[in-house]
Amino acid sequence: MLAGAVLCLASVALVSLQGRPAGRPPGRPATSGVACGLAAGVAFGLYFLFIRNAAAAGGLWPLAISRCTASTVVLTAAAWRGRQPVRGGAGPRLADLALAAGAGDVAASLLYVLAVRSGPFALAVVITALYPAVTVLLARLVLGERMRAVQQAGLALGALGIILVTA
């Protein structure tokens, strides 16, 4: 299982790598992107740990509270900046996509809680950590984005990691 977890971690790193932005000289690292990625990883890890512990004691209320809090923060920030959450002619389509994304997010969180209640926490966390790979795969399948070789290698490592973790 440990080897699978290491492969999944390597998978996320490879899938998340971005190409060199236009105008950036070769050899100059994108340190701000690395720092943001690390901060996001820590925040997601803490969120999953807190949701696991809270859901064990409070049923599904922690999920509802976290979603209401997130929505309040986003809508408040949009209002503070003077922006409408949905604008202009793209409104209904954008609103439908936002609702679908929100429903998918809630479903994923619910499945995560059910997974950590019924199985090993480590297994659920390792598989949940592969969300960047799923995002890249969806971008390829839904939007037709190109995947670089390093991202393809990351997806393959993720698949192998899942097999090793679950074996």
Image: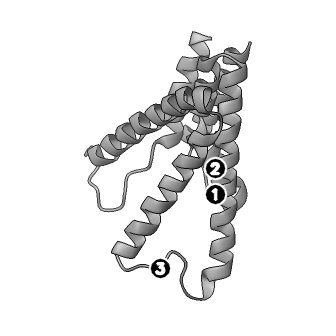
Regarding mark 2 in the picture, which secondary structure is present there?
Answer: helix
Q: Quadrant of the N terminus?
A: top right
The residue at the point 54 percent across, 34 percent down is 51
Q: How far across and down, in percent of the image, does residue 11 sit?
A: 55, 31
Q: Residue at x 47, y 61 (%)?
A: 72
Q: Residues within 10 Å of mark 2 (few under 14, many from 20)?
A: few
Q: Residue 145: which quarter of the image?
A: bottom right
Secondary element under disc 1, as helix, strand or loop, is helix
On-image quarter of the C terminus: top right
Looking at the image, residue 132 sits to the left or right of residue 27; the answer is: right
- The reply to whether the C-beta atoms of the residues labelled 2 and 1 are less than 8 Å apart is yes
Tag 3 secondary structure: loop
CA distance separating discs 2 and 1:
5 Å
- Rounded to the nearest whole Å, what is the CA distance between mark 2 and mark 3? 22 Å
**Residue 34 pos. (x, y %):** 34, 41
- Callout 3 amino acid: Gln
Does residue 144 appear in the picture of this structure?
A: no
Left or right: residue 149 compared with residue 38: right
> Label 1, on which residue?
102
Tell me which amino acid carries mark 2.
Asp
- The residue beneath circle 3 is 84
Residue 105 tag number: 2
